Amino acid sequence: AALGAALRARLAELHHRRDRAAAALGHLDPLAVLARGYAVALDSNGRAVTDAGALAPGDALRLLLARGAARARVEATEIPGAGEGN
């Protein structure tokens, strides 16, 4: 009986650890990030845009959202340390 209880306790601990690990990974899921209101901007080559300096007014972007996508065009860029509207 004691061995059975110990095995059940160990199994419950392992299930708990698995659930915590799954929750932690869920926070890194790109779709979960989008669901929190973020978007991924893709350039005309389908690459993620990570630097406003790589953009110019008129550049086309595809915005990936939690539900669907949108097309946008750059009007101006704002680069820290540079003048506004670069």
Image: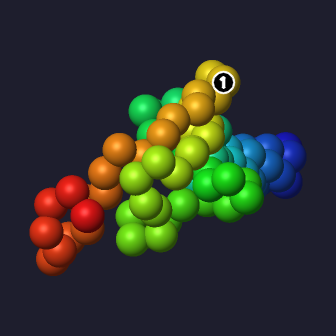
Instruction: Tell me which corner region of the image, top left, top right, bottom left or bottom right, holds residue 12.
Output: top right
Rendering coords of residue 57 (x, y %): 40, 53
At x 51%, y 35%, the residue is 72
Camera-side residue of 28 and 30:
30
- Identity, as a three-letter code, of the amino acid under mark 1: Gly
If the image is split into quadrants, where does the N terminus sit?
A: top right
Q: According to the image, label 1 marks what residue?
A: 68
Camera-side residue of 34 and 43:
43
Above or below for 40 versus 31: below
What colouring style does the render use? rainbow
Rendering coords of residue 41 (x, y %): 55, 48
If the image is split into quadrants, where does the C terminus sit?
A: bottom left
Which class describes the residues within 10 Å of circle 1: few (<14), some (14-19), or many (20+)?
A: few
Rendering coords of residue 61 (x, y %): 57, 45
In the image, taking residue 29 as reference, residue 8 lies left or right, namely right
In the image, taking residue 10 as reference, residue 32 lies left or right, namely left
At x 43%, y 60%, the residue is 56
Camera-side residue of 72 and 28:
72
- Outermost residue toward the front in this view: 58
- Look at the numbered disc 1 and give the secondary structure of its residue: loop
At x 39%, y 71%, the residue is 53
